[in-house]
């Protein structure tokens, strides 16, 4: 039995995101398939709520004014508990390379905090980032870069 919301989200992302399906129209069939794949109803419901939260973030302004470009993000204690130093450093790297802007960084942090996991590892953060970028119109290049980064990094590992 698969255990957490992120597993459900990753399953949906890997199997359906490139198909441009509309979740509302297919939610019941998706729920049924997820149950058949071994996910629990509670985790499935939380995953759909997480996706609804992600969709609601599209209503935010696209980016902060240029005067905040040199601002430093200070993480709360709770965020630091969930995102270790490697994760926070990776978010900074993504900002410095232009993959994430201030707003998309905040969306990633918001979606990480919406997960119920006590601590998020770097691999989970990368998946959440990929899902956020995929869901943001106008961020296709950043999504493509992130996707290449994730899969090229994993392709080089030989066991």
Image (tube, rainbow, N blue to C red):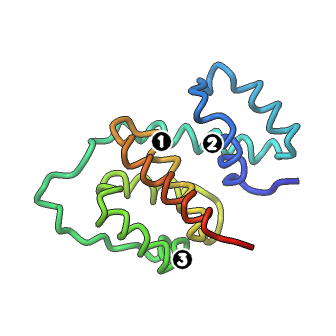
> Which mark lies nearer to you, 2 or 3?
2
Seen as rendered, the residue at the extreme bottom is 85
- Residue 155, percent across and down? 62, 62
How would you rate the neighbour count of disc 1 (Cα within 10 Å): few for under 14, some for 14-19, many for 20 or more? many
How would you rate the neighbour count of disc 3 (Cα within 10 Å): few for under 14, some for 14-19, many for 20 or more? few
Seen at 41% across and 75% down, the residue is: 89
**Residue 39 in the figure: left or right of residue 124:** right
**Residue 140 in the figure: left or right of residue 13:** left
> Which mark lies nearer to you, 1 or 3?
1
- Residue 149, percent across and down? 49, 59
User: Which quadrant would residue 37 be assigned to in this image?
Assistant: top right
**Residue 12 in the figure: left or right of residue 52:** right
User: Which quadrant would residue 4 be assigned to in this image?
Assistant: bottom right
Q: Marks 1 and 3, Cα distance to the nearest angstrom? A: 26 Å
Seen at 39% across and 73% down, the residue is: 75
- Nearest the viewer among 60 and 30 is 30
**Residue 8 in the figure: left or right of residue 17:** right
Seen at 82% across and 54% down, the residue is: 2
Seen as rendered, the residue at the extreme left is 67
- Residue 101, percent across and down? 30, 55
């Amino acid at each position: 039995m698969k255990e957490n919301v992120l597993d459900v989200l990753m399953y949906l992302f890997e199997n359906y995101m490139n198909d441009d399906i509309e979740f509302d129209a297919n939610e019941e069939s998706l729920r049924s398939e997820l149950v058949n794949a071994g996910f629990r109803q509670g985790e499935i419901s939380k995953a759909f709520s997480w996706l609804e939260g992600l969709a609601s973030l599209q209503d935010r302004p696209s980016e902060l004014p240029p005067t905040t470009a040199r601002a430093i993000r200070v993480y709360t204690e709770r965020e630091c508990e969930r995102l270790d130093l490697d994760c926070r450093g990776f978010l900074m790297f993504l900002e410095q390379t232009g993959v994430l802007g201030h707003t998309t960084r905040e969306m990633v942090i918001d979606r990480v905090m919406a997960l119920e996991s006590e601590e998020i590892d770097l691999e989970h953060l990368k998946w959440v980032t990929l899902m956020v970028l995929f869901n943001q119109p106008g961020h296709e290049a950043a999504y493509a870069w992130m996707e290449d980064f994730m899969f090229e990094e994993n392709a080089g590992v030989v066991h």
